[in-house]
Amino acid sequence: MAYFDQFTIPVKGLHLGIHEYAFEIDKEFFTRKECTLIKSGHFKVNVTLDKNIDLIILEVEFRGHWNTSCDRCTADIPLPVHGKSDYLIKYAAQEIDDGDILYIMKETTELNVSDLILDSVSVGLPIKKVFDCESLNPRPCDVETLEKLQQWSFNEQLTPANDVWASLQGLHLEEEE
């Protein structure tokens, strides 16, 4: 069995209505997908498939952690991440992915949701990689970096003597007559 076969959902012969599937993805998933954004992490993914006569509504909900580096102290952290994405799948004469709607052929017997899972998790990653790690024991923070950040202040670095604009305060432009 190929690794991504576990993410295949049979759509032909599936009764109309709601069907639920649960998956777990980890470092192996991201490595095999050759994902450049996510190198490591662990997520529980729930896929809800609502099959109708002429379309399928797919909901991908995930919760877990992304192993990355903290934007505040640069330490390696398990950043908590959760989110949800919805996909609309319609039947057509040929398979097309136009971004908003995924078109599959009426004869399609199965649907592999691994790419949709990767897209959902990737889009759901936060831009700012920090979280309240006070409850973790031990805290993953780089204490030395945090101490240096506390000592350093913009007010101390940007005084009128160092301000490039301060030297322009005495200049007056003469108006031409």
Image (spheres, rainbow, N blue to C red):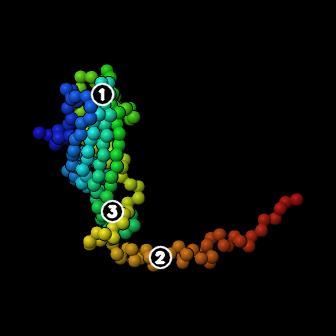
Q: Image height check: is 36 above or below 58?
A: below
Query: How busy is the neighbourhood of tag 2: few (under 14 within 10 Å), some, or many (20 plus)?
Result: few
* Image position, residue 158 (x, y; %): 57, 74
> What residue is shown with label 3?
69
Asked whether residue 129 is in view, the answer is yes
- What's under tag 3, amino acid-wise? Ser
Left or right: 139 as drawn, with respect to 99 = left
Question: On the rendered image, what quadrant is the N terminus found in?
Answer: top left
Q: Residue furthest front?
A: 17
> What residue is shown with label 2?
152
Question: On the rendered image, what quadrant is the C terminus found in?
Answer: bottom right
- What's under tag 1, amino acid-wise? Asn
> What residue is shown with label 1?
52
* Residue 79 occupies quadrant: bottom left
Disc 3 versus disc 1: nearer the observer: 1
* Residue 109 occupies quadrant: top left
Asked whether 4 or 10 is in front, the reply is: 10
